[in-house]
Amino acid sequence: TAVDMMRFSDQSLFRNAGHEDLDYVVVKWLASSEVEEYLAELPEIVGRFSRLSCVHVIEHQTDPTIGYVPNLRAMMNEGFARGFQLNEYAGLVNTDVYFGPQWLGNLVRYAEPGRVINSLHITAVPLAAMQHAKVGIVNEDLGVPEPDKFNQARFDELFWKHYADNLITAREIDGPGGWRQVATMPYLFHRKWWEACGPWATTFDWQHQAPSPDECFFARIAEAGAEFALVESSIIYHAEGVERKGNRPKGAEHLSEE
C-alpha cells in the first residue's frame, strides 16, 4: 500500500547499489491500484540505474488459516524461494529502508558460501527497546523514508561517521548474543543455508515464547556452522515496520495479528 515509500526506497536501492548483476524479486499481496501502477513502471525506473538488473513480481495468495503477520512471513518465504531459483545468493530488503552508497556491492565483495554477510543497520528502534546494544546496530530515528520526511542530511553524517572498509565477524566480538551482534538487515546468504535450514516458520510460538521466526531461522544457520559477519562499508537505514503498522491492505482487515 505504501507506494510513495516504495518509490523512494527503490530509487536509493538501485541508485546506490554499486552492483548491477542482480535480480529484484517483489512479492505483492493485496496490492492497491497505485502499487500495481507503480510495479508496471518499475522495470523502466530500474533501467535508469542499472543495465543488467531484472524485476520479478510474484503474488502471495492469502492464507486464511493464519494471521496477518504470518501471511507477511509467508511472503518472505516465497520471495526467498524465487530468489534462490535465480541465484546462488539472496537477501531480504524492506520497503521502509533507505540504502546508502555501494550497499550491495560491498556486501557482494565479502560474500562467501559459508558466511551470512550483513550491513551496518541504522534503525529507528530505540536502544531501550532492545535487550542490549549491538555492534551492527546504530539507534537513531531519521523519519519515514519518503520525500520531505526522511532526514537525509543526518543519514549522510552517520554514514561517514561509521563508514569503514572493514569486515567484522561475530567471533571477534566479546559481547552478549554472539552472532546476533552482527546479524542485521539487509543480508546475503548462500542457497545451501536455505536448503538446509529454511524456510521461516510463519507463526510465532506464543506458548513457549520462542524467539521470532526469523531469529529461529538464523539460529539454525548458526548452529549449522555459518559465519556471521558485518561489512562497515554497507550502511542502510530501516524505519522498522512502518507499512506493517499502518493501514492494512483491503481484504486483510479480518485477519488476526498473529
Image (cartoon, helix red, strand yellow):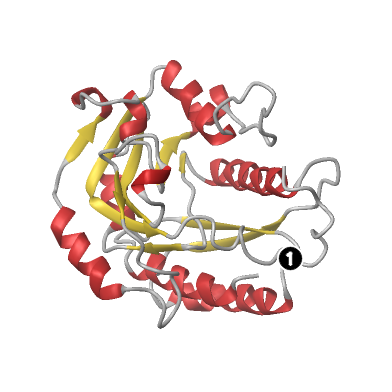
Which residue shows up at 61% across the image and 48% down it?
79
Q: Give the image location of residue 210, x and y in percent.
A: 59, 25
Which image quarter is the N terminus in? bottom right
Q: Nearer the viewer, residue 2 or 81?
A: 2
What's under tag 1, amino acid-wise?
Pro
Q: In the figure, 133 relative to 79: above or below?
A: above
The answer to whether one can see residue 115 in this image is no
Q: Is residue 113 left or right of residue 213?
A: left
Per the image, the residue denoted by label 1 is 249
Foreground residue among 78 and 152: 152
Q: Residue at x 63, y 41 (%)?
A: 77
Instruction: Please tell me how many numbered marks the rendered image carries.
Output: 1
Can residue 182 be seen from the camera position used here? yes
Location of residue 144 in the rendering, given as x and y in whole percent from the top left corner: 45, 69
In screen coordinates, is 27 left or right of 108?
Answer: right
Q: Is residue 5 above or below residue 202?
A: below
Residue at x 55%, y 24% (from the top left corner)? 197
Q: Quadrant of the C terminus?
A: top right
Alpha-carbon neighbours of circle 1 within 10 Å: few (<14), some, or many (≥20)? some
